[in-house]
Image: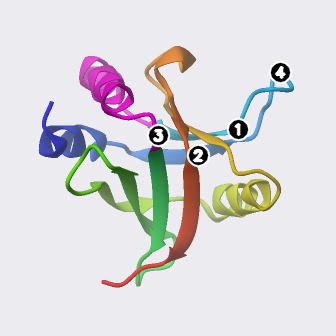
Amino acid sequence: MDRLVIESILAEADQIQFDGAQPQADSSCALVLGFKAAHTDQVILAFQELKKISDEISLLVCHTQVQGIYDLEIRTTALDEPVRILNKSIPAEALAELKEYLSHSNTLILGCNVSEQDSWITLSSVEIKVCES
């Protein structure tokens, strides 16, 4: 699957939440992308393709010029450019919880609301920063 196809599928995310629930001691918390049920098959396929192409996947959360709106970049050496999910709202509480979690842990899972956790992506690194426009 082409990077642009993955990008267009993931661009349909309409919510981003931090899931701090850790049902098991060895589980990581998750940043969960929310999608409408109509996109389930495409989203699951996009997640499977990302997992298949690389073991090293990182996430960059970029502040934009508008408060509460962020650009997400999913980076991997297997792709020539990051998968960009632009102009998404992240609730202030979710971002604060994510920052707090990342201050204590460097593991995070990227998930979605329309698939089982076995298709979610374990991230090798996560960074939140102001990015150049």
- The residue pinned by badge 1 equals 29
Query: Is residue 61 magenta-colored?
Result: no
Q: Tell me what residue is drawn at x 44 percent, y 69 percent.
A: 69
Q: In this view, does 17 lie to the left or right of 55?
A: right
- Answer whether labels 2 and 3 touch (C-beta < 8 Å): no
Q: Where is residue 87 in the image (x, y as percent from the top left)?
A: 34, 64
Between disc 3 and disc 4, whose residue precedes? 4
Instruction: Indicate the quadrant where residue 103 lies.
Output: bottom right
Q: Is residue 65 left or right of residue 92?
A: left
Residue with the mark numbered 4: 24
Q: Earlier in the sequence, mark 2 or mark 3?
A: 2
Which of discs 1 and 3 lies nearer the camera? The answer is: 1
Few, some or many residues within 10 Å of mark 1 (<14, 14–19, 20+)? many
**C-alpha separation, residue under disc 1 versus residue under disc 4:** 10 Å
Q: Judge whether 21 appears above or below 84 on screen.
A: above
N-terminal-most mark, 1 or 4: 4
The amino acid at mark 4 is: Gln
Left or right of 54? Residue 59 is right
Q: Mark 3 points at which residue?
A: 33
Residue 115: x and y in percent read 45, 18
Helix or strand or loop: what does disc 2 sit on?
A: strand
Label 4 to label 2, Cα distance in Å?
20 Å
118, above or below 36, in the image: above
Q: Which quadrant holds the C terminus?
A: bottom left
Of helix, strand and loop, which mostly describes the magenta segment? helix
Q: Residue at x 74, y 56 (%)?
A: 97
Residue range highlighted in magenta: 34-56
